[in-house]
């Protein structure tokens, strides 16, 4: 597999250094390009929380395309060092924060800011995406009112879940990758569903 690249923006064409070993599964260029085509110009001036960030590919792509800020969370020391390296090489370090921590601990904290996009791409086949969504549902103020949560999993991992604060609005499948999009449940939507 070739190193993921930045597809568009100020760091276009830059190939990211991968995390050593096989502990991460980088998003493919095809899926990342499709994701950012969906988001379009809404990426500009947005803030991102990139959980289980790996190489930092998604958050760095967002910064390259004009996002105002990205916070990268990963527990793996090598992943954190890789993200820091990739940010420095792309010249996007000033608009970012890299935190070595467990994503579930972070989601339990009192939010210090809101994010327009929360990207969740945990290790596969362990239901960690469901645990992440339930943790976020218990502490939803991490997400701005007009924000989206985006989950990246293998399609075989998917199962429909109900959340108090979020509703699934769309899915996009690209081979062995499924992207699931969630937004805030509006009071009107909650009334319609009850």
Image: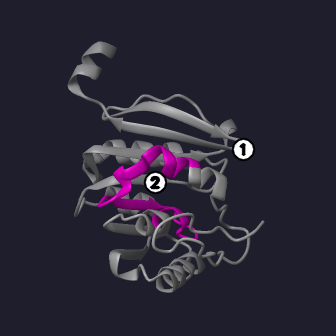
Q: Which residue is mark 1?
A: 176
Q: Is residue 40 left or right of residue 180?
A: left
Residue 82 belongs to magenta span: no
The image quarter in which residue 148 lies: top left
Element under disc 1: loop
Image quadrant occupied by the N terminus: bottom right
Q: Where are the magenta residues, as a range?
A: 34-59
Quick one: 100 or 188, which is closer to the camera? 188
Residue 160 at what x, y percent from top left?
53, 28
Residue at the (58%, 31%) spot, across then down = 159
Relative to 100, is 145 above or below? above
Judging by the rendered image, the residue that carries numbered circle 2 is 119
Please tell me how crowded label 2 is: few (under 14), some (14-19), or many (20+) other residues with Cα within 10 Å: many
Callout count: 2
Q: Position of residue 63 (x, y in %)?
A: 41, 68
Mark 2: which secondary structure? strand
Residue at image x 29%, y 46%? 140
- Mark 1: few, some, or many residues within 10 Å (few <14, many ≥20)? few
């Amino acid at each position: 597999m070739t190193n993921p690249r930045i597809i568009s923006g100020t760091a276009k064409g830059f190939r990211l250094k991968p995390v050593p070993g096989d502990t991460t599964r980088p998003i493919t260029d095809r899926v990342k390009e499709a994701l950012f085509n969906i988001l379009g110009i809404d990426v500009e001036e947005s803030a991102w929380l990139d959980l289980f960030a790996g190489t930092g590919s998604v958050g760095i792509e967002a910064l390259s395309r004009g996002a105002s800020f990205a916070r990268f969370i990963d527990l793996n020391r090598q992943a954190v060092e890789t993200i820091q390296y990739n940010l420095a090489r792309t010249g996007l370090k000033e608009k970012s924060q890299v935190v070595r921590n467990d994503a579930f601990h972070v989601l339990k904290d009192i939010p210090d800011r809101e994010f327009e996009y929360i990207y969740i791409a945990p290790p596969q086949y362990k239901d960690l995406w469901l645990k992440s969504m339930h943790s976020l549902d218990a502490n939803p103020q991490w997400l701005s009112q007009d924000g989206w949560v985006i989950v990246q999993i293998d399609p075989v991992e998917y199962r429909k879940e109900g959340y108090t604060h979020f509703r699934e609005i769309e899915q996009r499948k690209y081979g062995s990758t499924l992207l699931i999009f969630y937004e805030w449940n509006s009071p009107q939507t909650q009334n319609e569903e009850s």
